[in-house]
Image (tube, helix red, strand yellow):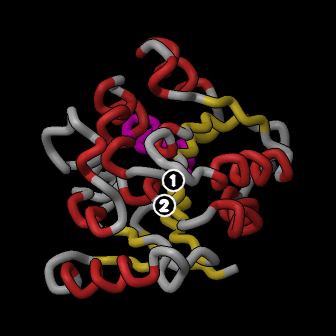
Amino acid sequence: MKKLFLSSSFNDVADLFQDFAQEDIKGKTVSFIPTASLPEKINFYVGSAKKAFEKLGMIVDELELTKLTNLEIADKLRKNNYIYVSGGNTFFLLQELRKQGADKIIKEQIESGKIYIGESAGAMIVSPNVEYAKGLDDSKVATELDTFSSLNIIDFYPLPHFGNFPFKKAVEKTISKYESELSLYPISNSQAILIEGTEVNIATK
């Protein structure tokens, strides 16, 4: 059964993850992918997420896609207990996941029951297509990305930072543009989308 924990800001909802995991997470390892943050000037959320995992008693195994070989990436994704993908630029993230074949391995691991934790960009890439993220992120930084088709693990479209600065207007415009054609799930920084099999719930901190 697939289990996904999707958030706008993991640090703000980390307490919800303990309940969602339904197991003792202390001492467990998490493959921590901060790659989406590389093109961004503001990236404090990466450090905040690391501290949040450590506060939960988990071991953070950083997996920077641009610095590791395909074999190293595959090994870490398969051996660690959880997979976390940070916020940042959604398009750059998708490009790098594809280049390293990490998209296929993440999908395989989710399908085998491993819990996936996605924050902002990391939440949007599990949707069928990330073109809707253009209002929040600059797609031009992903110079090698030839399609917006993404991991397609869920059949809806998480929309992070609903009502939160500095994305408030961008999110509202995205909703106006796509609400009639896409199944959008807007969430604020204090909410998380909890997916267990075919069941989808939104939890609020």
* Residue linked to disc 1: 87
Rendered location of residue 83, percent (x, y): 56, 41
Query: 64 or 81: which is nearer to us?
Result: 64
Residue 186: name its quadrant. Answer: bottom left
Query: 11 or 166: which is nearer to us?
Result: 166
Residue drawn at (48%, 60%) of the image: 120
Residue drawn at (27%, 40%) of the image: 142
Residue drawn at (79%, 49%) of the image: 51
* Residue linked to disc 2: 120
Whether the magenta-drawn stretch holds residue 189 is answered as no
- Mark 2–mark 1 Cα distance, whole angstroms, equals 5 Å
Q: Quadrant of the C terminus?
A: bottom right
Query: 132 or 180: which is nearer to us?
Result: 132
Rendered location of residue 60, percent (x, y): 72, 35
Q: Which residues are magenta?
A: 107-118
Closer to the chain start, of discs 2 and 1, is 1
